[in-house]
Every structure is written in C-alpha cells, then in structure tokens.
Image (cartoon, rainbow, N blue to C red):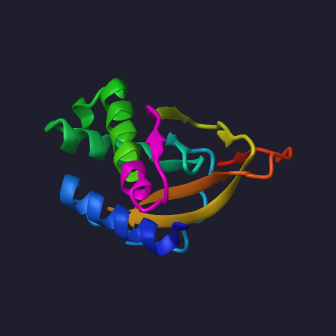
Amino acid sequence: MPISAIDICQSVESIWMSLLGLEVQPSPQVASLNGGKHFLTSCVHLTGGWDGAVTLECSMPLARQIASIMFSMEPEAASMEEIRDALGEMVSITGGNLKAILAGDCHLSLPTVAEGLDYRLAVPRSRVVARVGFECQSHPLLVTLLERDATGREVPGHNLR
C-alpha cells in the first residue's frame, strides 16, 4: 500500500501532539527549507518489503525546542548531542509509524542527523513519493518520503536541500 501525503499528515500530527504536546499544521508554503539558516535533517532508511527513506527537516530553534521537551530542560540548556538525539528519535518514530502502513516486512535503520548552514543531503537512486510541509510554533518542518528506484537503473540521488 503506498503512503500518501494524508498518511504523513496524520502520523506527524499525532506523533507531535502525543509525544511533544506540540501542534503541527500542514503548510503548503513550506515546500523546502532555504539555506542560509541553521537547519537539521534527520533520516531513517526502510529496507525489506519496501526500500526507501524518511527524512525530517527543521530549523535549529524547533530542534532545540524538541530536545527541551524530550529531556525536560530549558531550550538553551540543550546540548547539540541532545538536539541530534531528539531529532533522530522523532524521525525514527515517524518512520516506524509509516512503516506500519507499508505492505511486507520492513526494517528501520538507525537514524542519521545532519546539521549546519549550507549542506546537501542526498539519498542516491531514490525518488520523492511524498513531501509535506508543516509549521510548528511558527517554525518550518518538512517530512519527505523517498522510495528506492525499483528498476535498478541509474537514477540521480535526490538532493533534499
């Protein structure tokens, strides 16, 4: 069963409210996250009955807020390690929820987190299945589902930023 933007919206809204107590709202204006600001991208890969990846991109202030809620501390007190850990956990939970929708037995990888001002993250030989932009506390959030190209032909990696 393919995953739709509606599935992503429902999963993300549910996860963020139940785990963080934060409301996220779909926002068509968030189609990509512009460079020049400090952003983070977390990613998990799904393999098995379906091969692909789930990414979660957000601003540093939002990532810091996530860490502060998860670790019960003031946002300014969150270390980079805690921020990366929190964002990795959020993409793992999101990937796990989406994995449950997919047919077949899939396995979830450990999360990877990239952060910085100007970087590119690519998932080689993949295509975007769905990309949904959200706003959370006036900060952009972007969730992307990528699928490995099943034809085996050489497909350029999809640059997320």
Q: Residue furthest left?
A: 72
Q: Position of residue 62 (x, y in %)?
A: 36, 49
Q: Is any atom of residue 24 visible in this view?
A: no
Name which quarter of the figure residue 28 lies in: bottom right
- Across the whole image, how many numbered discs are drawn on residues? 0
99 with respect to 22 (left or right):
right
Horizontal side, residue 75 vs residue 121: left or right = left
Which residue appears at 55% of the width and 67% of the height? 2
Is 150 on the left or on the right of 81, as rendered? Answer: right
The location of residue 43, given as percent across then percent down, is 51, 41
- Is residue 55 at all visible to an observer of this figure? yes
Residue 106, magenta (yes or no): yes
Taking the spot 52% from the left edge, 68% from the top edge, the residue there is 1
Report the span colored magenta: 95-111
Image location (x, y in percent) of residue 141: 45, 57
Viewer-proximal residue among 73 and 109: 109
